[in-house]
Amino acid sequence: MNREELKSEAKGIIKNRLWDFWKPLIIYMFISMIIEMLLIKFIPLPNQNINPYEYSLNEALISFILNILTLPIVMGINKYHLDYVRGKKLNLGNLKDYFSKILPLLGLYLSIAIITTLATLCFIIPGIIVSFALYFAYYVYIDDEKGVIETLKSSSALMQGHKWELFVLILSFLGWALLGALTLGILYIWLVPYMTTTLLLYYDKLKKTTA
């Protein structure tokens, strides 16, 4: 798949539409900030200098619970961005659609986390390979809405022979990422939509060619 063509198409999609891309993410950031503040009240963070172990443990627990509670919203955002790339009508109300599917989503989330962690514990390289095999698993679920095992198998089959290609595509944004850091993150307002749209175009075209 031609990287330059994908990037050129992505630039065309996001042109004059950055606000459309960012709207659901701003809602997510606001909601997650409120949830995190509430969680800190129930799971207070001790002084990091006095008790760094307990601080890290509580911080990890808060992060895990936050990820679980916001998982349906994240999936709604993923669906929104797929529609954005595919030129479909955008509706922020769809962000709530996946709350009714929290159990299969939780199963998928935990399965990906466990499989990736176990593979990484064996060696770094297998962990990276597994990560790329399951890179688009959530989007596969959005499109097919199959069970957890079927989704993992479909994602792995989709990426068969394409992991290196995806790795190179992601790596091609490294220069932009470094430049974004030099602009104190201002460039990311454009870069995040550009990179996300490019990757979703890659997924969409790959899924069509392997269907």
Image (spheres, rainbow, N blue to C red):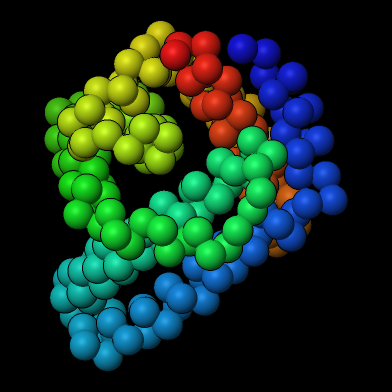
Residue occupying the point 45% across, 11% down = 210
Residue occupying the point 21% across, 88% down = 42
Query: From the viewer's perspective, is residue 164 above or below residue 189?
Result: above
For this rendering, which residue is in front, 92 or 55?
92
For this rendering, which residue is in front, 112 or 176?
112
Residue 183 seen in the current view: yes
Question: In the shown orientation, is residue 18 left or right of residue 77?
Answer: right
Examine the image and state in which quarter residue 37 appears: bottom left
Query: From the viewer's perspective, is residue 202 above or below residue 40?
Result: above
The quadrant in which the C terminus is found is: top left
Examine the image and state in which quarter residue 10 appears: top right
Residue 190 on image: x %, y %: 74, 50
Residue occupying the point 15% across, 28% down = 122
For this rendering, which residue is in front, 100 or 51?
100
Q: How many marks?
A: 0
Residue 110 on image: x %, y %: 19, 47
Query: From the viewer's perspective, is residue 31 above or below residue 169?
Result: below
Question: In the shown orientation, is residue 103 left or right of residue 94?
Answer: left
